[in-house]
């Protein structure tokens, strides 16, 4: 069983102030221009992505889009 921590009043000791190293929220949003396309995929491919998306709690279209983006980045 864990011992309870007993807090007392007194000096804290050596304290260092760290600068904020996290980016602001607007730098975390990646908005790229998107173009809507219609593409025919095999039933087994779509079922695979739907199954994996459900398992990872995401959207299957996002997974397909990310896969294509990674492919393009690797071959540019």
Image (cartoon, grey):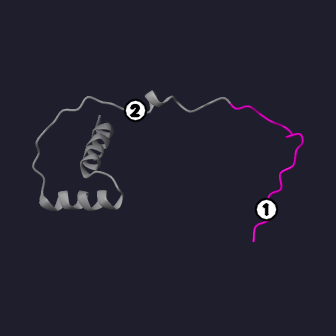
Residue 45 in percent (x, y) is at 18, 58
Q: Earlier in the sequence, mark 1 or mark 2?
A: 1
Residue at point 32%, 42% (across, down): 70
Q: Quadrant of residue 75?
A: top left
Q: Is residue 46 magenta?
A: no
Q: Which mark is residue 4?
A: 1
User: For the residues carrying marks 1 and 2, which lies nearer the camera in this image?
Assistant: 1
Of residue 45 and residue 54, the one placed in the foreground of this image is: 54
Of residue 73 and residue 58, the one placed in the foreground of this image is: 58
Depicted 51 relative to depicted 23: above or below: below
Residue at point 44%, 33% (across, down): 28
Q: Quadrant of residue 16?
A: top right
For mark 2, does the 10 Å Cα neighbourhood hold few (<14), some (14 to 19), or many (20 or more) residues? few
Q: Which mark is residue 29?
A: 2
Q: Is residue 58 left or right of residue 47?
A: right
Query: Looking at the image, how many numbered discs can be counted on the residues?
Result: 2
The Cα–Cα distance between marks 1 and 2, rounded to whole angstroms, is: 42 Å
Q: Magenta stretch? A: 1-18
Q: Disc 1 vs disc 2: Cβ atoms closer than 8 Å? A: no
Q: Is residue 11 magenta?
A: yes
Depicted 72 relative to depicted 45: above or below: above
Q: Which mark is residue 48?
A: none
Q: Is the magenta region chiefly helix, strand or loop?
A: loop
Residue at point 12%, 57% (across, down): 42
Residue 41 in percent (x, y) is at 13, 52
Residue 24 in percent (x, y) is at 51, 28
């Amino acid at each position: 069983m864990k011992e309870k921590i007993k807090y007392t009043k007194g000096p804290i000791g050596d304290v260092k102030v760290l600068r904020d190293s996290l980016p602001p929220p607007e730098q975390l949003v990646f908005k790229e221009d998107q173009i809507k396309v219609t593409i025919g995929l095999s039933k087994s491919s779509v079922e695979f992505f739907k199954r994996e998306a459900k398992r990872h709690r995401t959207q299957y279209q996002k997974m397909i889009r990310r896969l294509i983006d990674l492919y393009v980045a690797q071959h540019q």
